[in-house]
Image (cartoon, helix red, strand yellow):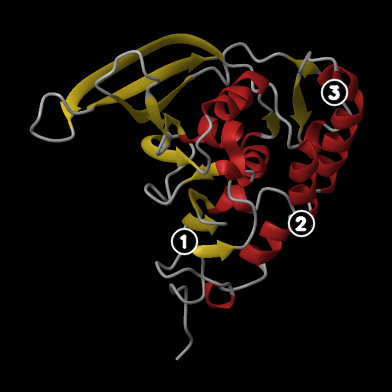
Amino acid sequence: MAQTDSPSTTFPEIVELNVGGQVYVTRLETLTAVPNSLLWLKFTQSSPGELPKDSKGRFFFDRDGFLFRYILDYMRDSELFLPEFFKERRRLQKEADFYQLPELSRRLSAVSKDSSYAEDSGDPEEAELPSPATSSSDRALLRSPGACAGYITVGYRGSYTIGRDIQADAKFRRVARITVCSKISLAKEVFGETLNESRDPDRPPDKYTSRYYLKYNFLEQAFDRLAEAGFHMVACNSTGTCSYSGNDPGEDKLWTSYTEYVFSR
C-alpha cells in the first residue's frame, strides 16, 4: 500500500526549533523562504526523521541561539534591523555563512566596514539589511526610534555588621548574587555569556524574566556593560532590616539590604 503524507515523512506547517538551547516556533514557509540556504535544504530535501531532535522532539541546531533570532527575522520579513550598540556583527556574519545566506553575509560585512568608524567614536548606528529581493538597492544606515528601547532592572542583596562601638568600621559581606529583570533579548544583548539562565531556561527572546542572574558579583562590571549598551540609570531604591546575631542586644547588629537599579534605553 502506498504511503501518503504522514508525520514521519512530512514537516508540519508550524515548526519548533531548539537552537543552542533557545526555543523558536515558526512557519515552515519561513524556514524555506531563501532557496539553497541550509534551512531550505534541511526542510525541503530531508525528512523529519533525518534531522536531529532534542528530548522534546524539537529540531535541534547546535548554533548560537541568541543570534538565530536575526537569521529568522531576515528570512521572515525580508529585511533586518540590528539594534543600536550591536557589537556582534562578525559573529552574526559567521552564523549567516553557516546557514548559507551569502547575501546576508555580504551585507553584514559591508555594514561592519562602513560603521567601524562610528563604533570606534562612540556613535553607534543601526543598519537596515535588505533581502536578496532588494539587494540591488542602496543600503541605508538608520537609527531605530524605540525599536530596541526598554528597561533592565539590576538588583542585589547585601549585608554588613556594625559592632558595639559605632565608631568602628562596618564589616561588609560580599554581594551574593546580582539579579537581572528584563526582556530576554535585552538581557542577552547586554550581558551575553556572563548571564546565568539556569533558573529560567528555554524562554523565547520576546518574553520577560525576573530569574536571571550574573556570573560575577561586581556591580561596577554590570554598570559598565549597561553603559556600553547605551543604558542610563533612571531610578533606584533600597530597603533594609536590622537584626542581632544573638539574644543579647549588645551584640553586633546585622543589617541586610536589598537594592534595585533601573536602567533605560
Residue drawn at point x = 70 percent, y = 64 percent: 41
Element class at badge 1: loop
Circle 3 sits on which residue? 139
Mark 1 Cα shell of 10 Å, populated few (<14), some (14-19), many (≥20):
few
Quadrant showing the C terminus = top right
Gap in Å between the C-alphas at discs 1 and 3?
Answer: 36 Å
Tell me the amino acid under the disc marked 2: Phe
- Residue situated in front as seen by the camera: 128 or 82: 82
Circle 1 sits on which residue? 12
- Direction from residue 166 to residue 204 in the image, left or right: right
Tell me the amino acid under the disc marked 3: Arg
Tell me the amino acid under the disc marked 1: Pro
Kindly identify which numbered label has been placed on residue 99: none
Q: Quadrant of residue 56?
A: bottom left
Q: Quadrant of residue 164?
A: top left
Q: Position of residue 86 (x, y in %)?
A: 70, 29
Q: Is residue 112 above or below residue 95?
A: above
Q: Which numbered mark, 1 or 2, is in the foreground of this view? A: 2
Circle 2 sits on which residue? 98
Q: Which numbered mark, 1 or 3, is in the foreground of this view? A: 3
Quadrant showing the N terminus = bottom left
Q: Position of residue 59 (x, y in %)?
A: 52, 64
Q: Position of residue 122 (x, y in %)?
A: 79, 15
Q: Position of residue 55 (x, y in %)?
A: 42, 70
Mark 3 Cα shell of 10 Å, populated few (<14), some (14-19), many (≥20):
some
- Direction from residue 16 to residue 144 in the image, left or right: right
